[in-house]
Amino acid sequence: MLDSIQFDLDAYLRRIGWEGERRADAATLRGVHLAHLRAIPFENLDAVGGRAPSLDPADLTAKLVHSRRGGYCYEHNTLFARALEALGFRVTLLNARVVVGADTIASRPRTHMALLADVPGESRPYLADVGFGAIGSLLEPVPLVADVEFAGAGRRHRLVHVPHDGPLEMWLLQAHDPAKDDWTGQYAFTLEPFEKPDFDVINWHIATNPRSPFAQRLYVQHVSAARHLLLDGRLLTRTRPDGTVTEREVTDEAEARRLLEEEFGITAPEEVTLLTG
């Protein structure tokens, strides 16, 4: 449970364009989850500018709801958790190990925030996550059940159990790669609850550690029904739902600002240099 500071649900739902029901049920959870992802971009401009973004509720609302900005996982999922609680869901904060590109699960620290949402009347909670900055991210939440494939908004996912040295079961979220016709691990987690102070520390570390990729280069993504758009440093990648990928390099600072404004829906702060290195 997050703090009890009043949450402006009306403003949030306007920001994501949600005009559907405001009920704590699975259909609303799926709809609001997808609307959030398509409305609010993933971005790390604060970290690139040398500071950790605030996770204070008022600051999150000002930045992600009332401004042309986005955020990364701690910002997105903290905001989304507050919206879900305002809608009547019970939410647990989870901490996951990102395994995309990793040799082993244990080689990565727990740095990703994900959510577990309990739906009244349903026996199983849902894994929800609007802040995973990768092509394998969930577009809709999935029930917490192992070895079952779920298709949501054009992407396929499943959860599996993996062995590890610990008292709690380790879950692994996998995404289907249409280009390879294979399953790829995204992140691993247990159901141990984490609290806001835990993520205050992790957020500061990820944003300010000079070895963190989020502190080193721009990483921005936007999802629509037609494409997944990613600007990673200077590389702009468009991925279609069928897996078709096109790439090109962005070399000009002015062009990078125009791309963020016109295609990502982000007005970049003037003091932040976008194309570093």
Image: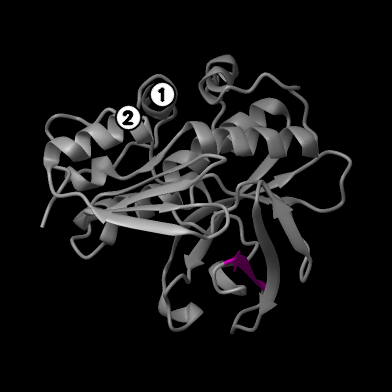
| Label drawn at residue 48 | none
Residue 29 vs 135, above or below: the answer is above
In the image, what residue occupies the spot 15% across and 48% down?
A: 275
- Of marks 2 and 1, the one in the foreground: 2
In the image, what residue occupies the spot 77% across and 71% down?
A: 147
Residue 184 position, x and y percent, is 56, 72
Q: Is residue 147 magenta?
A: no
Q: Is residue 173 magenta?
A: yes
Q: Residue 91's image quarter? A: top right
Left or right, 141 with reference to 251: right
Q: Which residue is mark 2?
A: 262
Amino acid type of the residue that numbered disc 1 sits on in the rendered structure? Ala
Can I make out residue 209 in this image? yes
Q: Residue 103's image quarter? A: bottom left
Amino acid type of the residue that numbered disc 2 sits on in the rendered structure? Glu
Residue 44 position, x and y percent, is 30, 45
**The N terminus lies in quadrant:** top right
Q: Which residue is mark 1?
A: 58
Q: CA distance from mark 2 to mark 1?
A: 26 Å
Magenta stretch bounds: 169-178
Left or right, 78 with reference to 10: left
Residue 242 position, x and y percent, is 57, 57
**Mark 1 Cα shell of 10 Å, populated few (<14), some (14-19), many (≥20):** few
